[in-house]
Amino acid sequence: MFVKVCGLRTVETVDAAVDAGADAVGFVFAPGSVRLIEPAAAAELIARVPERVETVGVFRGQPIDEVLRLARASGVGTIQLHGDEPGDHFVRAAAAGFRTIRAISAARYTESGHGGDERLLIDATVPGSGATFDPADLPVPPRADWLLAGGLRPDNVAALIAAFGPSGVDVSSGVESAPGVKDPSLIRRFVAAARP
């Protein structure tokens, strides 16, 4: 089970995620997010991350030139785009040497399906809100590799993995003691629960 811990902003929480065995750590560059981090600060944290752990920059509704600038400045290896970004944004990110993840809501996926080549992250109805995921929101999960996100916590992640059968999970608010404040003990519990 691939595990991504997102919205990290401190040495303590990055170390907790890496030490717990997370496969990826995420840094949010989307304006207005309580988890926003400056690229220089993210670069210092990324320098601590071993090569085996994927580093992901999270963006939402930003011009692709800005996305690429911030991604380069921070040193992330993967660009995750939320929302309705056109396919050429992913093509440009890949051409610039980044891996990509397309994050969409379950409702959007169910309405339109997905024909792109990007890795998919399917979030609850309101992406980034921490709203609990209802299995009814995603009656037909993707067949290919994909990440489940949205309302995941240490106490429910195992059941939701069993219900949906994703190849990976992504957590942010579910390992916080307050909005934007990650709890190292919750991070460790989440990673352990995702891999019983």
Image: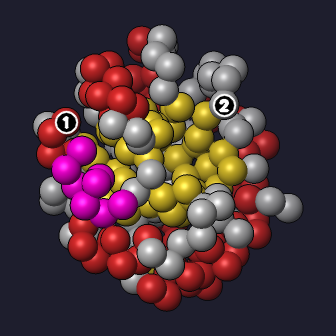
Q: Amino acid at mark 2?
A: Asp
Q: 172 above or below 69?
A: below
Q: CA distance from mark 2 to mark 1?
A: 25 Å
The residue located at (48%, 58%) in the rendering is: 55
The verdict on residue 108 being magenta is: no
Q: Check disc 2: other Cα within 10 Å, few if <14, some if 14-19, many if 20+.
A: few
Q: Are marks 2 and 1 in contact (CB under 8 Å)?
A: no
Q: Which contiguous range is marked in magenta?
A: 68-75
Q: Check disc 1: other Cα within 10 Å, few if <14, some if 14-19, many if 20+.
A: some
Name the residue nearer the viewer: 34 or 50: 50
Label 2 or label 1, whichever comes before in sequence order: 1
User: Which structural element holds mark 2?
Assistant: loop
Q: 135 above or below 39?
A: above
Residue 129 makes an appearance in the image: no
User: Which residue is labeled 2 in the image?
Assistant: 145
The residue located at (22%, 55%) in the rendering is: 70
Q: Quadrant of the C terminus?
A: bottom right
Residue 124 x %, y %: 46, 41
Residue 47 x %, y %: 45, 75
User: Which residue is labeled 1 in the image?
Assistant: 64
Q: Taken as a whole, is the magenta stretch helix, strand or loop?
A: helix
Q: Is residue 138 left or right of residue 20?
A: left
Residue sitting at the far right: 196
Residue 10 makes an appearance in the image: yes
Q: Is residue 55 left or right of residue 9?
A: right
User: Which is in the foreground here, disc 2 or disc 1?
Assistant: 1
Query: Residue 79: which quarter of the image?
Result: top left
Query: Residue 49: which quarter of the image?
Result: bottom right
Query: Residue 66: which quarter of the image?
Result: top left
In the picture, the disc for residue 5 is none
User: Which structural element holds mark 1?
Assistant: helix
